[in-house]
Image: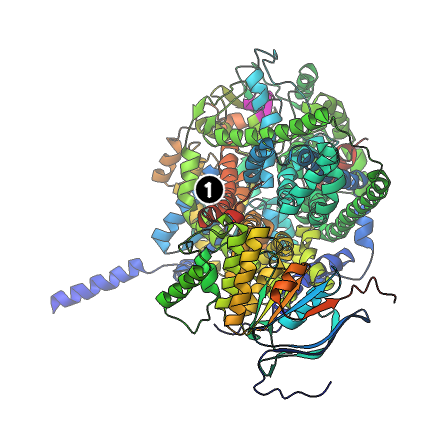
Amino acid sequence: MNARTLQNQKGLILENVNIQLDGRTLLELDTTIEPGTVLTVMGESGSGKSSLLDFIAGFLKPDFKSTGRVILDGTDVTTVPAQERHIGLMFQSPLLFPHMSVAQNLMFAIPSEINNRTERQRLAAEALEAVNLEGLGPKDPAKLSGGQQTRVALMRTLLARPKALLLDEPFSSLDQSRRTDVRQKVFSIARERALPVLLVTHDFEDAEVAGGPVYRLDSPATEPQ
Amino acid sequence: MKRLLIAAAALISGLFTLQPVSAQDSDWKDVLDEAKGQTVYFHAWGGEPRINAYIQWAAREVENLYDVRVVHVKVSDTASVVSQVLAEKSVGKTSGGGVDLVWINGENFAAMKTNELLAEPGWAQSLPNWTYVDTENKPTVLVDFTVPTDGQESPWGMAKLVFMFDTARLDTPPASLDALLAYAKSNPGRFSYPQPPNFYGTTFLKQALLNTIADTSVLSAPVDPDQFEAQTAPLFNFLDELHPHLWRQGQAFPKNAAHMRQLLADSEMDIAFSFNPGDASGAIVNGELPPTVRTFVFDGGTVGNTHFVAIPFNSSAQEGAQVFANHLLSPMAQMRKQDPEIWGDPTVLNVADLPANEKALFDTQDLRPATLTPEELGPTLPEPHPSWVTALEQAWATRYGAGGQ
Amino acid sequence: MAKFRPGSNLPSLIVVLLLAGPVLAGLAGTVLPAFGYLPVLGAREITLEPFAQLFSMPGLLQSTALSFWTGLVASLVSLAIVLCFSAAWSGTQTFQRVSRFLSPLLSVPHAAAAIGLAFLIAPSGFLARLLSPWATGWERPPDLLLVNDPYGVAMTLGLIAKEVPFLFLLTLAALNRPEIKSYTKVAASLGYGRMSGFFKVILPQIYPLIRLPMLAVIAYSTSVVDVAVILGPTTPAPLAARLVVWMNDPDLSLRLAASAGALLQLGVSAGAILVYLLFEAIVTKLSSTRLALGHRIKSDGAGRMAALGTMVFIVSAMCLSLLVLIIWSLAKSWWYPAPLPQNWSISALSMALMQTPQILGTTILLGVLAALISTSLTLWLLETKTHAAEPVDHQLRTLIFVPLLLPQIAFLFGLKMLFLMIGLDGSFTAVLLAHLVFVLPYAFLALSDPWQRQDPRYARVAASMGASRARIFFRVQLPMLTRPVLVTLAVALAVSVGQYLPTLMIGAGRVVTVTTESVALASGGNRQITAVYALLQLLIPFAGFAVAAAIPAVLFKNRTALRLDA
């Protein structure tokens, strides 16, 4: 691959990424996700999707071997610890912290530089409003419906001011009607904030709505060799 | 001027009368001075609330009188104290030891003495109250299980084997070893003794040995392993005959003296025994035994000994320990100790030779009906040499304690 | 927030520093005398003489066999009871009710449980009194050998009564996971009976979680002293109980044989564990062929009732024992056949309470500190090890568990020497350090599994929001582990409170706890005093467990997902 000028280049660049386990290549990827666009990654289970997410987010286990770089908004973050990468993560399940209220979950994500209490509370309330959940702040997250939980999880991710989003089948647990709704919300916010998004999914509809390029991972198990 | 002279003379004469006369007294004064402010950790068996309360009282006394603080370290087994001093010696801790004074006698004393774990000899006889100790009629205050005390332990109380029975169930108690065997045979399951090496169990064995051995004189010397079997044959014949008629057929034994008391109270057993002649009275006061319980001894006497307090070689408060040991020998402390309502442990003092006031304390004491008078208690048989204890316990364990004979 | 990035080896280093000295000293204090080396007694030659002396002890073989069998049988029966009961009733109302009874029983110290049980079943005991003489015709107690029987039946029962709550609690924790419930439903929908579904589907999944504790139970049961002394046979006694007698014999040379005996005891415990592992392998092998045969055993009603009956029997026996202890603590005179005391008195109780504030304070302070230190250290160790992406290594694990496997009495003589040499003995700090040696393994045992079962994605989500390691630990992981951490603290507290020999020997009588006080007072055998102190001993762990249960209930009143649903 030809060298790119990194300075001032916005977006998420995955440069010559190669992930191996036990000497076997799980996946290879070399691509750029522009701000506000969605790269959809599709593939069978076991095709290495989660390893890719782990690699980008900084959680890859030491038994995996990897080469290549992750460049975010012009900065090489490949060796930066997860908590300093500013890459937001959403999983299949919302994973709201069960010991905190909805508002506490949101405030947990707000950077500590904003240290005024009322300002933090205001931001959390505003985030709830943005997804039509105003007033649910004091609630127990376990009492929310699945769609509500996913929306809170989304806002929690965004409140941490990420520079990119990694979505690991975040809509798969929602029923059809909710799904369209929530998906729309996620993508529009990403566009608004010019965030590069990497979406892992099984669902063709997800890919269609996302509108960006689609990358197919073949299950190495089905490949000869 | 004249006045001044008189005052000076008075002062001088006063000084003279205050001044200790003998060298011994001046030594003791030094001990008292040194002891001031010391803390004495007194390691003593803590299994009897009455005794614990007595020790507390004595500790309060010496704190008020001599500014010596005594802390009762309650132990479940004196051997653990020996163990502690031994460990301290192993690592060369020759001062500042953890034990300042220990309640001890018999085998534990012998073990500490032979392993040189005790303070220099002679301190016990130098205590001011030693003069009241009855060395004439109570020879065991000088010889502990045939081992000379050499002034390395100070006597505290007298112990003697006494039996207890409930008059509500038994009129005439069996007052000899043979009568006891006959009683057990006709009333199976109603007598037993704690399992050696429990102290009370071993004491019962010693009593039986004293009653069965042909020549008691061999008991004052160490065991001759070649003769042991022949010498103890009558004892084990007796036990072989007795065991099938014991409580639980001799397959399980009472755990200790208190367990025997409990079994007597629950009418599981008819006869129990103790090593403290005032035990029955105390237990009745306590509610542990019914008021109908009485005490008896074997004709011809029962085994008895003296218990002591000793100072380990590395005690951090040697003087304070001596002051406390001396106080325990005072007539007042000894009188209270003998009171069945307080403890019921017989005195080591020669009451007849006490000053009149102190003697009166003892003369007016009510020993209660369950306690035998000194005359009724009969002669005290001396303890065998400690080596007999080990040999007896081993032989017993081989015969009765190893399962499936 | 401050950076939280200690070297991944710092907690390991602390654990090693804390344990290696005591463990090595304890081992040396056991092994050297066993081979004839104890200079203070003039023994300086390496010889096998102590073993010869040991094997010449009358009845040694029976003692060894007794320790081995009672321990192994008690452990196996306890496990069987717990598993059968869980198989038959988990997920039902009955199960919940019984578990509410069993959990507090865990705080009853072994000795107290054994004393209560002995009061209960003896021929002049509580049960006989309730029935005599009107039903039994016993005007006097019959001469029946129910306690201290030569085959160790009473002792085995005592051990079972005590191990069942422990194993049950662990099984309960293992079962309390959402996916387990779904598997239960799957097995049922495939037509499997409750019990066969449990044994074929659930047990293989939860067994790894109860395996290590089970081995600890075997090690404990084969080397138990207090229960053996109270309920066990005496002609001869089990090995561990005899070791204590030899160790405390005024004839100091017996110590060498006792040390050799300690090694034999280690062999007995290790042997019992090996036999268990063999048994486990055989069962696994046999059942793997039976697993797929399709036997569904739908009608298991009789089995279920039997499992319930056994469990209810154990729970009632324990509760009755406690009741008898309470009555005795208030009884001045209580002679057969009176079903209730002839004379009541609170003197023993008030005397104990008057004397104990300071002792109680020392006990609680020791226990709380030991619990906090051992739990924090365990958490720290687990957190760093997770981050270093390597499990807690084998040597470290062994080091942590050695103190559980070696008989305390021999181990402690070496430990005592170590503390004497560094001039620490007799101090509060020294006793605390000694407690940690025995508390840490339990903290580790109780906490490592819940830690490993956390969903790692929560930490990842938090990290992706920029939370530091410290923030993730204190704000996310720790609060979500509140319940297991509190239970660990309570277990650690209970273990610390239960330490008798370490407190006595290292504390040199200067540090007095409720336990040393109770054992000393109980040595006189006065039942009222014994009962009062047994209850006092039970009070602190009980309070600990109650608090551990209450805190999450209050803290998570509005947090459904963290509520315990058994």
Quarter occupied by the C terminus of chain B: top right
Horizontal relation, residue A126 to residue C72: left or right? left
**Residue C186 against residue C499 in the figure, above or below:** above
* Closer to us: B160 or A29: A29
Is any atom of residue C370 visible in this view?
no
Magenta extent: B263-272
Residue drawn 56% across the image and 14% down it: B169
Secondary element at image label 1: helix
Chain designation of label 1: B
Q: Which residue is mark 1?
A: B52
Q: Position of residue C340 (x, y in %)?
A: 49, 21
Q: Is residue B105 visible?
A: yes
Q: Is residue C22 magenta?
A: no
Whether residue A28 is situated above or below residue C374 in the rendered picture: below
Quick one: B100 or B223, which is closer to the camera? B100
The residue depicted at 55 percent of the width and 28 percent of the height is: C320
Compared across the picture, whether A128 is left or right of C436 comes to left
Is C533 or B278 nearer to us in this picture? C533
Q: Position of residue C242 (x, y in %)?
A: 71, 43
Q: Amino acid at mark 1?
A: Asn
Image location (x, y in percent) of residue B144: 60, 45
